[in-house]
Amino acid sequence: MAFRSTSRSVTVKTLVSTPVVRCAVYTRKSTTEGLDSDFNTLDAQREACEAYISSQRLEGWVLVPDRYDDGGFTGGNIDRPALSRLMAGIRNGLIDCVVVYKVDRLSRSLLDFAKLMEVFDLHQVAFVSVTQQFNTATSMGRLVLNVLLSFAQFEREIISERTSDKMCAARRKGKLLGGPPVLGYDIDWDRKRLVLNPVELQMVKGLFDLYLKMESMLEVAKEANRHGWQTKSHTSKSGKKRPGHCFNKVDVQRVLTNVTYIGQINHKGEIVQGEHPPIIKKSVFQKVQQLIKHNRHAGGKSYRHQHNALLKKLLRCGNCSAAMAHTYAKKKNKLYRYYLCTTKQKQGRETCNTPPLPAQEIEDHVVEMVKRIGKDPELVQQAFTETVEQRKRQQVRLEQEQRGLLEEQRQLENKIERLVAAIDSCNAPLATIGEQLRKAEELVSQIERRLAEIDEGLDQLESEAVDREHLVAVLERFGLLWEVLTENEKTRLVNQLLESVVYDPVSSRISLVFQPRAPSISSRGN
């Protein structure tokens, strides 16, 4: 029996597994409106994205279990909690692809989007928009993405400009756009207008009348406080209470120079007619403005300058650091001049324990202190050493202030960007956003002015070296010069030489703080 051998060929098929692509869905909505409903826009976005991921199942796409939903956050910045968690997951290697409903759900800022794409590319993470059919894994997808994002940012900027123009136009028509009310008015939120406050309008009229009589804002503030008047106290629309306080010189000035009281509105330096009723007649208001202008150049009411005050604007209280104002009293036709702490003067005797200082006595003592410096070689050397050290300390202070202001400026600019971005989200009334923008821009302008002053001061410190011979000569000649100068010239010389004079009521010590070209030295009072 013969056996027949047969051969069968067996084909072995090798299965190649598809790599898994871990996909995260990111959703965003600018406002919180409707988020508490059973099915909101975040759910709709997520449903569309999950359906797209399911369609790519054969490509290995799988949905990660974590949800990344930002409800009530603008796309104008990347300060969002869910987005932060998403970026953390990308950096930790937990995500391979980010899927969104539309590109502007991730960001509306081209600059922010570029930063996000850098992180995506660094960790080889793809970005997909399910309604705009592109994928950043390809060069064409990245090009389309940048084009779409440019238009998204352009749209946001156009909305911001339109809103700003609308608010400016409304302001020029005299309409109320928000902000706290001023003394004499309340806000009718239903009609969005200022309405008269019967009690406070009498206070406003009283302040104007007092200034026309006294010609001194400080005296007006003191008289107002004696009457028990206070600045505006109100509750904001959000329910935040802002209590009033006793008047000071600045509060009085704000009232006296506010065109609101003649029925007008100041919009960025442009005076327009408002919709609210006036409190003060224009003739009275103009008369007060002329008087303020005259007193600003003349230094106040004339009687305050009948007697020379050598240490005016120089003498400070060592207890509360406030200025000590020059004043006087007459008794039996005899004049008594003295310096009084302004804290005690404005807020009462119990607020500061520094007593009134006899003006002539402390002025003579300060002059003698300066004279002694020029006569003593050791004090002259100390003068030079202290001057150099003081310039260094001043430079350090200016540089520290400069760094603080630059950081504050950066934060304000970020805040302005967020406020502009918030316009399209409608998270807050446009009037509220506009008021916040105005305040932030004013603060930035103030910081820029101060930074310019600091730059000028630092340049001056760097360019001007301390001339020892010149300083010594000035101090040595001070005594001789003093005897031949007029009263006005003496005052001018002291202000050029001294930065401040500090009186310590506990030790009776008088400390002279010289200008950068002069020393700093202390002496116990007689």
Image (cartoon, helix red, strand yellow):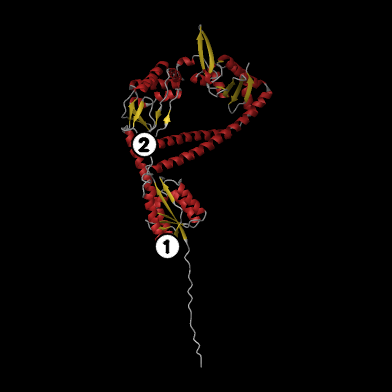
Q: Relative to residue 277, is residue 158 depicted above or below?
A: below
**Kind of residue indicated by mark 2:** Ala
Residue that protrudes farthest toward the top in the picture? 332
Q: Which residue shows up at 36% across the image and 45% down it? A: 34
Identify the secondary structure beneath mark 1: helix
In-image side of 137 versus 197 (left or right): right
Q: Is residue 370 left or right of residue 15?
A: right
Q: In this orientation, which residue lies closer to the viewer: 522 or 137?
A: 137
Q: Nearer the viewer, residue 198 or 259?
A: 198
How many marks do you count on the picture?
A: 2
Q: Earlier in the sequence, mark 1 or mark 2?
A: 1
Q: Which amino acid type corresponds to the residue marked 1 in the rendered image?
A: Arg
Q: Residue at x 44, y 46 (%)?
A: 77
Query: Under tag 2, what secondary structure?
Result: helix
Which residue is painted at 51% across and 90% down in the image? 3
Q: Residues within 10 Å of mark 2 (few under 14, many from 20)?
A: some
Could you say where residue 510 lies in the image, as x and y percent from the top left?
A: 61, 20
In this orientation, does residue 28 appear? yes
Distance (Cα) linking label 1 and label 2:
49 Å
Query: Mark 1: few, some, or many residues within 10 Å (few <14, many ≥20)?
Result: few
Whether 494 is drawn above or below 427: the answer is above
> Quarter of the image holding residue 474?
top right
Looking at the image, residue 392 sits to the left or right of residue 229; the answer is right
Query: Which label sits in the foreground, 1 or 2?
Result: 1
Return the residue at label 2. Answer: 431
Q: Position of residue 23 (x, y in %)?
A: 45, 57
Residue at the extreme right of the image, as rendered:
378
Residue 252, picture quadrant: top left
- Disc 1 marks which residue? 57
